[in-house]
């Protein structure tokens, strides 16, 4: 009797495992990266990004009289939010970054250049694509133009 119960329990377990294994498996080829070339520039690469995904970087450093220039090369209807959070030098690398309270947000679409003036400091860069996105975004910190400084 014990052998029959043991055999029945094993059969039920095998059937349960087989049923779980029959579900649809979705693979993602999504890839996002931020390469900080130096503390004044970075390149963001996006390939088949998943909505809701994000990537964060080490710090970009903005000094007095500098601005951020964002040069995207994305599909026309792609939208990416770039968040800047100050105090990057004091963050713990073992903790997830806070994407709820950025100091600045930059909406990037298509291939239009965006220029932003921010307070001097060290900023963590977080990238949040709003849909499946492909392309690159170059960000550089450079001397602010006279028009932007006013």
Image (cartoon, grey):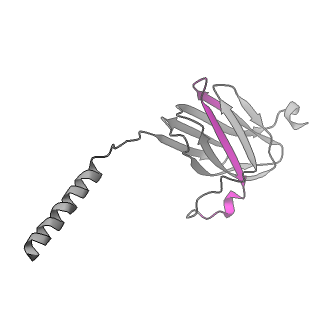
Looking at the rendering, the stretch of residues picked out in magenta corresponds to 71-92
Q: Front-most of 4 and 124?
A: 4
Quadrant placement of the C terminus? top right
In the rendering, at what x and y percent does residue 38 appear? 62, 47
Q: Is residue 70 above or below residue 86?
A: above
Q: Residue furthest bottom?
A: 2
Q: Residue furthest top?
A: 76
In the rendering, at what x and y percent does residue 33 appear? 52, 43
Asked if residue 112 lies left or right of residue 15, the reply is right
In the rendering, at what x and y percent does residue 1 appear? 8, 75
Q: Is residue 11 above or below residue 121?
A: below
Question: Residue at the spot x=63%, y=36% of the render?
Answer: 80
Residue 118 occupies which quadrant of the picture? top right
Q: Front-most of 34 and 78?
A: 78
Question: Residue at the spot x=60%, y=43% of the render?
Answer: 128
Q: Residue furthest front?
A: 1
């Amino acid at each position: 009797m014990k052998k029959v119960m043991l055999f029945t329990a094993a059969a039920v377990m095998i059937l349960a495992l087989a049923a779980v294994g029959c579900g649809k498996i979705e693979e993602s080829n999504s890839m996002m990266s931020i390469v900080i070339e130096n503390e004044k520039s970075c390149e963001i690469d996006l390939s088949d990004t998943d909505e809701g995904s994000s990537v964060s970087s080490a710090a970009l450093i903005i000094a007095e009289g500098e601005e951020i220039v964002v040069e995207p090369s994305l599909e026309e209807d792609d939208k990416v939010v770039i968040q800047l959070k100050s105090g990057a030098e004091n963050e713990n690398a073992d903790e997830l970054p806070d994407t709820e309270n950025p100091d600045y947000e930059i909406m990037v679409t298509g291939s239009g250049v965006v220029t932003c003036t921010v307070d001097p400091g060290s900023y963590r860069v977080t990238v949040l694509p709003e849909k499946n996105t492909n392309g690159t975004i170059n960000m550089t910190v450079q001397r602010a133009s006279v028009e932007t400084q006013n």
